[in-house]
Amino acid sequence: MRANILKRKLTLRIKRKKRIRAKISGCENFPRISVFKSNRTLYIQAIDDVKAVTLAAADGRKLGIKANKEGAKKIAAEFAKLLKTKKIEQAVFDRNGYVYHGVIAVLAESLRENGIRL
């Protein structure tokens, strides 16, 4: 029974992801910030969808950050610094099908606090 629940949750997330991605896209000056959350860590990328290139990325494992709210604040601060070095101040936030709540919401708010307009 537990496997069915997990499969259903994943299926719903993928459906949300496809619905969101149909509406948003990023370019070089206005990239798409994509978030992936595992049980242990967070990953963030700034993607130029026109050229299909990753402009910047932050990996929570390399920074020693866990997938909790404090970790989300830390990785967002590091990622914002990286984006500013690349002269990117505006972006589109792609929550990747995750509900805008908890860690994902803290991550987006922390990016805004660090000067990235979403």
Image: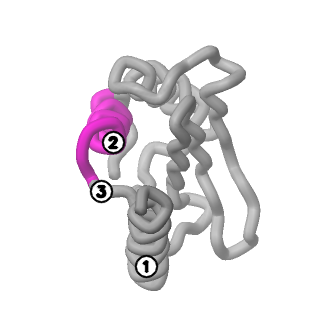
What element does badge 2 sit on?
A: helix
**Where 118 sits versus 20, above or below?**
above
Q: Are marks 1 and 3 in contact (CB under 8 Å)?
A: no
Dot 3: within a 10 Å radius of its alpha carbon, few (fewer than 14), some, or many (20 or more) residues?
few
Label of residue 15 in the image: 1
Mark in the foreground, 2 or 3: 3
Residue at figure coordinates x 59%, y 51% from the top left? 46
The residue at the point 63 percent across, 58 percent down is 47
Q: Name the residue under label 2.
A: 108
Q: Which of 94 and 31 is in front in this view?
A: 94
Residue 8, percent across and down? 41, 70
Q: Which of 11 and 51 is in front in this view?
A: 11
In the picture, the disc for residue 99 is 3
Q: What residue type is labelled 3?
A: Val
Q: What element carries label 1?
A: helix
User: Does residue 55 show up magenta in the picture?
Assistant: no
Is the residue under label 3 in contact with that under label 2 (CB below 8 Å)? no
